[in-house]
Image: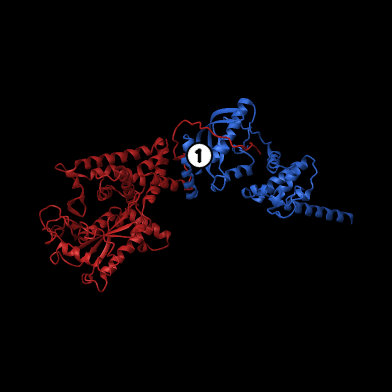
Chain colours: A blue, B red
Amino acid sequence: MDQGVINIVIEQMDNVQAEHSGLELVRDTDGRLCVRGPVGFAMDYEGHAIEDTYEIEIVIPDDFPDAPPTVKETAGAIPADFHQFKSSGTLCLGAPVDVRRRFAQHRTLIGFINGQVIPYLYSYSCYRDHGVLPHGELDHGSSGLLDYYMEHFGATGLTTLKLLKCLADGFAPPLGPCPCGSGRKLRDCHGPKLDELRPHYQPELFEFELRQMINAARAADIDLPDQDVMPTRMWRQKQSRLRKEANAGKRKCK
Amino acid sequence: MNEAENRHQLNHLLRDLADTLDVPPSKYAEAKDHYRAVGDWLNADDSELADFSPEIYAQGSFALGTAVRPLGDDEYDVDAVCLLDLTDSQVTQSELKEMVGRRLKHPSSRYKDKIDPEDGGRRCWTIQYADDSQFHLDVLPALPDRPEWLRAGSVDDDIAAHAIRITDTETPDYLIGWPAEGHGAHDPTRSNPKGYATWFKDRMRVRLDEAKASLAIEKRASVEDIEDYEVRTPLQRVIQVLKRHRDVRYNGGDDRPISIIITTLAANAYDNEANLYEAILKIVPGMRQHIEDRDGVWWVPNPVNPLENFADKWEESPRKAKLFFEWLDAVEAEYQHLITDEGFRKVGTYLAESYGQRTGREAMTKYASRATSVAAPVVIVPSKASEATRPRVEPSSKPSKPWSC
């Protein structure tokens, strides 16, 4: 691991330990840098006052602080079916692009812990004790992602897919009409909302998520205006497949 | 308990620590440029010293490869001998000292405003370079020496050949000549830095040759092209580690053991161990064995001058000796503890406490950046408390909603 990254993390530990003195920085047996130990909090959100402590392990990525860390709960206090990645047990703090966007606003461990990890832990405590998630939750899979983007854009599902296509294609003319149909230029309508997300994710990742949403819609027999919502690459693929099928059909006719 | 693994990791970590303490090669090059430039100035055609073919060479920790980066605002202290081809019957101490001083302070000399103090120190002229270079160079005027007891063969002839006489304003004969020979007591004008360096290198010959051979392979060069200062043996690294440990523990106090005592005792105790951790555990207890008790007086004899006791100050202040022994015990205990799992877990804190926050941090950074995996996690920044605090965390107006794929 790069010494510059390690230096940054060691420096940031001062601020982390000023509030969470039980956390330590270790190099684990795989050579990864981890912040681990007990993290406690007292939080009050809309009348749900909770004090609690969890054992966590935060893994620092090689490209920290460009990318956010990942975090696990290590004492088995949170059941596997509560918002975790199945394969790794990593906590799903939110929609991936949202986790990155929030982290990019401070790029610090203490900001990550207080602004992202603790709200998540608090949500679980609340759910366990009162049966509710105070800030709500997203559905599993692409449906949850669609909800996140709809809320972010303040738009319907179809408009959201059209806007995501702009991100997946990596380009949308700012002076062209906004895909939402308002009649305004993109720049003066949903453009700023796109700009909020664009720096935090590669077009390929937006495309990956958008394809999942389109496939889920298809599976549910929802008819979509393909050319308006499909990432351009996906659209071209479909066109060429259709042509081949058509050609194959012609040959059969002969 | 996994002592073998901890021992292996400590070897790496000590190496990272020593690397952190080491003077960067660029500073070595800078030091060399500085004293060579002084040599050129003293040798220039219009120099009154040119007839005595002044030769300038480094002595002390820069010559031995045991220098450590200065702590805080301290400066690099480079010592250089300026040897003139004269005999002690041709010039008095003060004449020798002033000859060199006059040349350095010559109106057309670039050093004329850099000599501090202006009338010289006890043994040397100090050249103070610009603030940002963090350097000062001590130039010791000297002439070759061949005293009776050296001729008698008590010291190897090739070592004795490098003996020199330096000036000392605190000897009674400073203005009129040189201390007379043959009282059996050490004469502070007698010195042999080159001989000492030869002795020092012989003490680590196996590892020095090995390190140079391995660097030669790496650089695809021949061993003859590798300079001694390009490599570090475990002995040099242990000395660097001990010197910084001392600096932190004594915190600049007057009772701190002088570097030459540490260097001499460590070199005597070293048995060409290859592993740094083994070397430190061999050297630290072994240093004690090489301090002689001569009728109640502690002696650390200069290996190239049997009349000189490096620990002569211990006689007038026995406290120095007592603190030195306590220090050795403490270092040994620390390293014995570090090899246990409990000790090794806290190695980061230990380094910060014993070698300074910044040094400890840098060494741990180097160590943590290694790709090799370890058998047990290593704590780089230990927790400040075993229990979690529960600070009030203000929720943001719109926290993320948990999701899963």
Which image quadrant for residue B28?
A: bottom left
- Left or right of B29? Residue A57 is right
- Left or right of B4? Residue B180 is left
Which residue is the site of mark 1?
Answer: A35
> A130 or B279: which is nearer to us?
A130
Which image quadrant for residue B9?
A: top left
- Left or right of A66? Residue B218 is left
Badge 1: few (under 14), some or many (20 or more) residues near its Cα, within 10 Å? many
Residue occupying the far bottom of the picture:
B45
Residue occupying the far top of the picture:
A129
Tally of numbered tags: 1
Which image quadrant for residue B381?
A: top left
- Left or right of A191? Residue B208 is left
Q: Where is residue B159 drawn, in percent x and y? A: 22, 59
Q: In which quarter of the image is the C terminus of chain B?
A: top right
Q: Where is residue B85 drawn, in percent x and y? A: 20, 67
Q: Quadrant of the N terminus of chain B?
A: top left
Answer whether residue B192 is visible to the viewer in this image.
Answer: yes
Residue occupying the far right of the picture:
A254
Q: Where is residue B252 drawn, in percent x and y? A: 29, 46
> B157 or B131: which is nearer to us?
B131
> B287 or B396: which is nearer to us?
B396
The type of residue carrying mark 1 is Val
Q: Which chain carries label 1?
A: A
Q: Where is residue A99 drawn, in percent x and y? A: 61, 42
For the residue labelled by badge 1, is the local secondary structure a helix, a strand or a loop? strand
Answer whether residue B11 is visible to the viewer in this image.
Answer: no
